[in-house]
């Protein structure tokens, strides 16, 4: 336990669908370790089960960050969700992975080779970015990290075998499409700021290992946006596709 009341406030904001109007100074996480602890306090408070993770980095050589996602916020395409179930809706097109088998905690760090050899599946993912804070995005990054790194929901295509898709696949600049009501919304310049998103996976596995968590093969791990975040203002249909992986659809009502 962190001693902060922020976890209870975040859980209440989710249950009651009510924004946190102001972040008190005493509730601001002092460091990333506390923010990560608050993430899990929120899940325990809500009696939630981890169904996915979001991870990312601002540059290939930057420190990765991540957050667990409540299993009830993970959907398989085609998904239909109410706009008023979110405080705001921004969408990002991403690539997600699953591991072929569980990776339990261990005393020494998992190597990059061990982690990449364990990848079993790959999918297209659409993250709905949201925040429980009224002042977002003008908010301390550690508060955003504590708030599931601004995750609202995750939608995925069907999972494809990684060893079939990966050979020859361009992870730096895949061919993709993102449309809103049939109109393209992907920017002209595409790319994941972390570079090859697979390079984030060792960080996640070792992050979980340090926290005493087994990385489960049913977890979907989404790895950062290729398109940036696009604000959606009302009922609409979002369609995303990544060549050789698949496609997905989200209808916002």
Image (cartoon, rainbow, N blue to C red):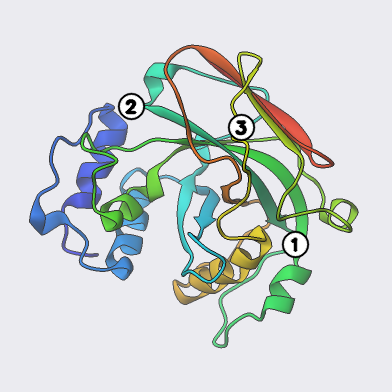
Which residue does the image show at 29% across and 37% down from the upper left? 132
Tell us which disc is closer to us: 3 or 1.
3
Of marks 1 and 2, which one's residue comes earlier in the chain?
Answer: 2
Percent of width and height locating residue 230: 49, 31
Q: Quadrant of residue 110?
A: bottom right
Separation (CA) of disc 1 from disc 2: 34 Å
Residue annotated with mark 1: 119
User: Badge 1: how crowded within 10 Å, few (<14), some, or many (20+)?
Assistant: some
**x, y (%) of residue 214?**
57, 67
The answer to whether mark 3 and mark 1 are in CB contact below 8 A is no
Residue 248 to residue 98: above or below:
above
Name the mark nearer the viewer: 1 or 2: 2
Q: Position of residue 215 (x, y in %)?
A: 60, 63
Determine which residue is flagged by label 3.
Answer: 186
Residue receiving disc 2: 87
Q: Image point 33% across, 48% down: which residue?
A: 147
As measured in the structure, the alpha-carbon distance from the residue carrying label 3 to the one carrying label 1 is 28 Å
Instruction: Report whether 60 appears left or right of 45.
Output: right
Q: Nearer the viewer, mark 2 or mark 3?
A: 3
Q: Is residue 245 left or right of residue 43?
A: right
């Amino acid at each position: 336990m962190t001693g902060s009341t922020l976890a209870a406030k975040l859980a209440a904001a989710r249950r009651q669908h009510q924004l946190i109007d102001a972040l008190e100074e005493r509730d601001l996480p002092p460091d990333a370790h506390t923010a990560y602890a608050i993430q899990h306090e929120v899940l325990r408070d809500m009696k939630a089960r981890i169904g996915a993770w979001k991870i990312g980095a601002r540059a290939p050589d930057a420190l990765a960050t991540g957050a667990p996602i409540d299993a009830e916020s993970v959907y398989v395409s085609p998904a239909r969700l109410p706009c008023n179930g979110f405080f705001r809706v921004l969408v990002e097109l991403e690539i997600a992975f699953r591991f072929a088998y569980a990776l339990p905690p261990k005393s020494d760090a998992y190597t990059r080779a061990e982690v990449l050899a364990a990848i079993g599946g790959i999918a297209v993912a659409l993250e709905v970015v949201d925040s429980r804070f009224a002042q977002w995005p003008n908010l301390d990054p550690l508060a955003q990290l504590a708030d599931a790194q601004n995750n609202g929901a995750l939608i995925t295509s069907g999972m494809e075998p990684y060893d079939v898709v990966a050979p020859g696949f361009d992870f730096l600049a895949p061919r993709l499409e993102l449309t809103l009501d049939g109109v393209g919304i992907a920017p002209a310049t595409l790319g994941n700021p972390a570079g090859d998103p697979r390079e984030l996976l060792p960080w996640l596995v070792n992050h979980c290992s340090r926290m005493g968590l087994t990385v489960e093969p049913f977890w979907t791990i989404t790895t950062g946006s290729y398109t940036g975040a696009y604000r959606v203002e009302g009922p609409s249909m979002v369609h995303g596709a990544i060549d050789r992986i698949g496609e997905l659809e989200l209808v916002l009502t």
